[in-house]
Image (spheres, rainbow, N blue to C red):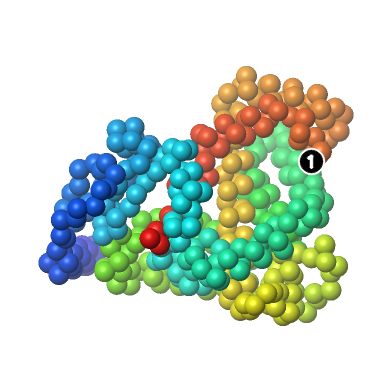
Amino acid sequence: MAMALLQHLFLLTLVIAAVIAVLLKNKPRKRKNNLPPSPPKLPILGNLHQLGKLPHISLHHLARTYGPIIFLQLGEIPTVVVSSARMAKEVMKTHDLALSSRPQIFSAKHLFYDCTDVVFSPYGAYWRHIRKICILELLSVKRVQSYTHVRVEEVARLVDRITESFPGTTNLTKLLGLYANDVLCRIAFGRDFSAGGDYDRHGFQKMLEEYQELLGGFSIGDFFPSMEFIHSLTGMKSRLQHTFQRFDNLFDEILRDHQKENKAPELHKYLVDVLLDILKNGYGDMPLTRDNVKAIILDMFAAGTDTTFITLDWGMTELVINQKAMERAQAEVRSIVGERKFVQETDLPHLPYLKAVIKEIFRLHPPAPVLVPRESME
């Protein structure tokens, strides 16, 4: 116990000394830039202390006081935050080209093959190339429609799992997590991980939880780049390397399997097969590497499971709490579905109240309340 306390005190002293050294070396100069309104800052931290445990809520409160565009000094990183639809349009449409690059986030560099995925790749020829591949090859309307049978079968399996648990207690959170993972894994890899035992063998849930914690948690190197070395002392770097290695081993196994048996017709290919074809035959002027393929797969895997699961989980939670909304949604579904056991995708245009419920869930519990940060190029 005493030894652990001494280690913590030593680390804290080292951090403070490093911060002081950085500040003495890089003493800030007064800027004359015409910056947006800004809340009061603390020395060293700037406005970091005002983000709190729920940054999107803290930013909302700051926007109510200082307006829809504010300037925050997050450690060493000057940051502009926009919080209205009009300002978002200015950033994401009017001035999109000047503001469309990405900062090099410490955890993303280690998890996403040095930021060679779609989400964290800096703006340039490579990003435009892989974005084109994703839009035209992986997520085209025909490709999405070709996986209808997967979605139908997995919804049926989810309903059966819930039915089987009756009259006992149903762990809906776990079942919804399995559903989201199964849909994505079948579409991306053509593998039924939960039924085949691979879900437990690979420790999918633990891998995802560790990934989410590392990517979404506080990283001192992102706010104080000059102190990035601290991640080696705190163990965060080794955790990132361990999690990356687990995903990398899994993707290597999947790629090897698909390279042996890649004979599916064009519209019935899984996402990994499409990427392997591009890896082998090329696409445009810029070739992809094996690591590029794995980075794109991780994007699809990470973004396609957690976001779906969070929305479904919160949606059911809110409906259980709000009985009137639950009864109205049930009545609408039953009026369209009738005696059938499952809702079909063709039923969705006839369910306006259910659509309104989903939009309200997105408003109350957005799965990604703060977008991936952008970096200005001008």
173 on left or right of 351: left
- Placement of 310 over or under 2, stated as above or below: above
Left or right? Give the position of 28 relative to 367.
Answer: left
Q: Quadrant of the C terminus?
A: bottom left
Q: Residue at x 51, y 48 (%)?
A: 93
Task: Report x, y in % for residue 290.
Answer: 62, 78
Which residue occupies the extreme left position in the image?
A: 24
**Residue at 33% from the left image edge and 35% from the top image edge:** 67
Q: Where in the figure is residue 33, as x and y percent of width and height?
A: 24, 52
Placement of the N terminus among the 4 image quadrants: bottom left
Residue 274 drawn at (x, y percent): 73, 69
Quadrant housing residue 187: bottom right
Give the crowd class for mark 1: few <14, some 14-19, many >=20 residues within 10 Å: few
Give amino acid for label 1: Glu
Which residue shows up at 52% across the image and 35% down it? 363
- In this view of the protein, can residue 50 be seen by the observer? no
**Which quadrant would residue 352 be assigned to in this image?**
top right
Residue 203 placement: quadrant: bottom right
Task: Work out whether 261 lies above or below 211.
Answer: below
Would residue 288 be seen by someone viewing this image from the given angle?
yes
Secondary structure under badge 1?
A: helix
The reply, left or right, for residue 106 in relation to residue 93 is left
Left or right of 166 in this view: 40? left
Measuring from the top left, give residue 308's x and y in whole percent: 62, 47
Most foreground residue, 5 or 230: 230
Q: Which residue is mark 1?
A: 345
